[in-house]
Amino acid sequence: MSAKIAVLGLVIEEPGPAHRLTAKLRQRLASASFVDSNVYSALTRLERDGFVRAIAEDDAQQADGGSDPGARTVPQRTADPQATAARSRLAAVGRRGEEVGLRRAAPRRTPGSRADSRSFEATAAGVRHFEEWLLRSSTAPPLRDELHMKVALCQPHNLPRLVELVYGQELVCLARVQELKHTFERMRPPAPNRWSGLVLVHIRDAELSFWEARLAWLQGVRASLEGMHAEYERATGASRLRSRAVGAGAGQLSALTSQRWQRSAAYEHADRSKIGQRRSLG
């Protein structure tokens, strides 16, 4: 999911400054885990592409119907000749400082910075771009979860550690499910005329369904991996016992053969001794 298109949709819904757009994005798409820098860079790219334009805070207040309806208009006072002369001298000093390069550069105004008090509104091109994206068919997202790859590529000796990793993911999912349920309990029913609140209910339901399905999958995978590990341990244990038995049998056979050879050699030596004695006597 692109932060750029999400921020554009929020600007079209309601123009505002970067910090307000960031708060709305976190509320609307909490599971996407967007951070402040995502919103700021998205606004920069949208402004560069001509999809949004920045307006000053005063302009934004006028677009919303003015700042404070009870604000008083301060009457203009009569110009003081001495104050006018002082301002002229200060202006001359400022011009001289600019000529020698002493004037400080104005801070760069980037979306979200404290020096930037601008709000952002969508342009006609931005609205068209967003509508084209919204009405375009969506493709199924590829499944590139890191844990899926680890399960697919693991070896039998990796199973104990993999079971631990899966269990850790279970705890994360369980905490997320409990957090979402607690959020639902605190939420007030959306007003019938509040469209953003109505669609937010579906987004929360989708998030809860996703985490519950992942939790169930993790629990099933952990049970399967534990069974595979137990079977592997039994198979390797029996194999080790057979190897030991075969080794012991081979050792016993070797010892028996050695004993038989020694006996045969002794018998042959005794026979030769007897034959030699008989020849000497004859």
Image: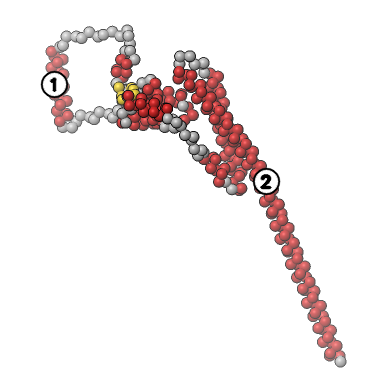
Q: Which residue is mark 2?
A: 231
In the rendered image, residue 89, in percent from the top left (x then y), is placed at 13, 21
Q: Is residue 135 left or right of residue 66?
A: right
Q: Where 258 falls versus 271 (above or below)?
A: above
Residue placed at 34% from the left, 29% from the top?
A: 46
Q: Specify whether 94 is left or right of 66.
A: left
Q: Amino acid at mark 1?
A: Arg
Residue at screen point 42% across, 23% down: 24
| 2 or 1: mark nearer the eye | 2
What residue type is disc 2 on? Glu
Residue 254 visible in rendering: yes
Q: From the viewer's perspective, is residue 203 above or below residue 225?
A: above
Q: Which residue is mark 1?
A: 89
Q: Residue at x 16, y 11 (%)?
A: 79
Q: Nearer the viewer, residue 162 or 43?
A: 43
Q: How many marks?
A: 2
SS state under label 1: helix
Q: Quadrant of residue 135?
A: top left
